[in-house]
Image (tube, rainbow, N blue to C red):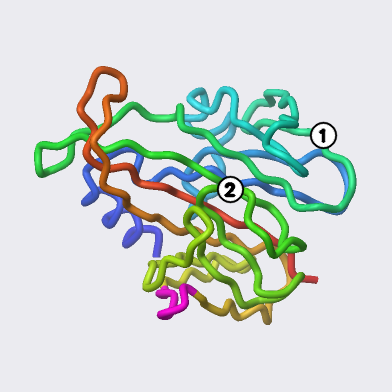
């Protein structure tokens, strides 16, 4: 499976395509924030692009109440309080890249850990239909985005790609205990100047992690 995944990533032709940001949150201790390729074990010292993860906007209750982070060897840590979900946003990871069509595209990253809250607080977010549930909905700026591709990684390493339905909903089989990772991309056409480049598309990348008892 690793060889197949590597081939898929190589064909994308863009370094940013294989990278995600995700949050790991346990019952106690700080939340851990990673930038890397979640299909593979985190290399010692962190992913080679980890240095690009500098100052994500991390929060729990409100985006106006940003939680400071501490840099470790291969991840960032954020001390959190209470049992609510934790979220982040970061639009300063990779510079805009030119695609095969000769046009520039940029990426904005979002991440959430937990499935206690059903109301979104990020522009692009995967929310459970009920607290602690295994059926989810994909929302962009508060509205469902149907037929989106969803990548699921189970605690045992099982990987599956599915699509959300016409209501932007999908169900994750949670028969294995441990941490689940979900990944969704959403492309939005724009006409914007970023880093002195004319950007015609922004790919919004969101992840969700949760622990199944």
Name which residue lies at 25% across and 48% down.
10
Residue shown at 49% from the left, 62% from the top: 143
Looking at the picture, how far across and down is residue 17, in whole percent? 34, 45
In this rendering, the label closer to the viewer, 1 or 2: 2
Q: Name the quadrant containing residue 147.
A: bottom left
Q: Quadrant of residue 146?
A: bottom left
Dot 2 corresponds to which residue? 122
In terms of secondary structure, where does tag 2 sit?
loop
Farthest residue, direction left: 101
Q: Where residue 46 sits: x, y (%)?
A: 56, 32
**Front one among 162 and 167:** 167
- 100 or 66: nearer the viewer: 66
Graded by Cα atoms within 10 Å as few (under 14), some (14 to 19) or many (20 or more), the crowding at tag 1 reads: few
Rendered residue at 44%/75% (across/down)? 164
Q: Position of residue 200 (x, y in %)?
A: 22, 39
Between residues 181 and 132, which one lies in front from this camera angle?
132
Is residue 171 located in the magenta-colored stretch of the structure? no
Q: Work out which residue is located at the far top of the displayed protein and give it.
A: 196
Q: Nearer the viewer, residue 202 or 180?
A: 202
Disc 1 secondary structure class = loop
Residue 134, compared with residue 114, is above or below; it is below
Left of 87 or right of it: where is 107? left
Q: Which residue is mark 1?
A: 79
The correct choice, above or below, for 180 with respect to 204 in the image is below
Q: Please report whichever mark, 1 or 2, sits nearer to the chain's N-terminal start.
A: 1
So how many labels did they put on this image?
A: 2
Find the magenta span and give its range: 162-168
Quadrant into which the N terminus falls = bottom left
> Magenta includes 167?
yes
Tell me the quarter of the image containing the C terminus: bottom right
Rendered location of residue 130, percent (x, y): 72, 74
How far apart in space, not on screen, are marks 1 and 2 (Cα)? 20 Å
């Amino acid at each position: 499976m690793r060889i197949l995944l590597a081939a898929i990533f190589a064909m994308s032709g863009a370094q940013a395509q294989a990278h995600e940001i995700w949050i790991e949150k346990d019952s106690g201790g700080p939340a851990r924030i990673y930038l890397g390729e979640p299909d593979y074990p985190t290399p010692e010292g962190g992913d080679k692009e980890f240095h690009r993860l500098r100052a994500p906007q991390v929060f729990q209750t409100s985006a106006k109440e940003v939680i400071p982070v501490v840099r470790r060897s291969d991840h960032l840590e954020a001390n959190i309080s209470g049992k609510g979900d934790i979220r982040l946003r970061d639009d300063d990871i990779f510079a805009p890249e030119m695609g095969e069509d000769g046009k520039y595209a940029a990426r904005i990253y979002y991440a959430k850990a937990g499935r206690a809250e059903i109301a979104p607080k990020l522009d692009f977010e995967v929310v459970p239909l009920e607290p602690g549930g295994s059926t989810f909905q994909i929302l962009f700026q508060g509205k469902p985005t149907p037929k989106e591709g969803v990548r699921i990684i189970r605690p045992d390493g099982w990987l599956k790609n599915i699509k959300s339905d016409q209501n932007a909903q999908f169900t994750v089989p949670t028969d294995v205990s441990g941490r689940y990772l979900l990944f969704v991309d959403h492309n939005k056409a724009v006409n914007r100047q970023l880093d002195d480049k004319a950007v015609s598309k922004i790919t919004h990348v969101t992840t969700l992690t949760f622990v199944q008892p």
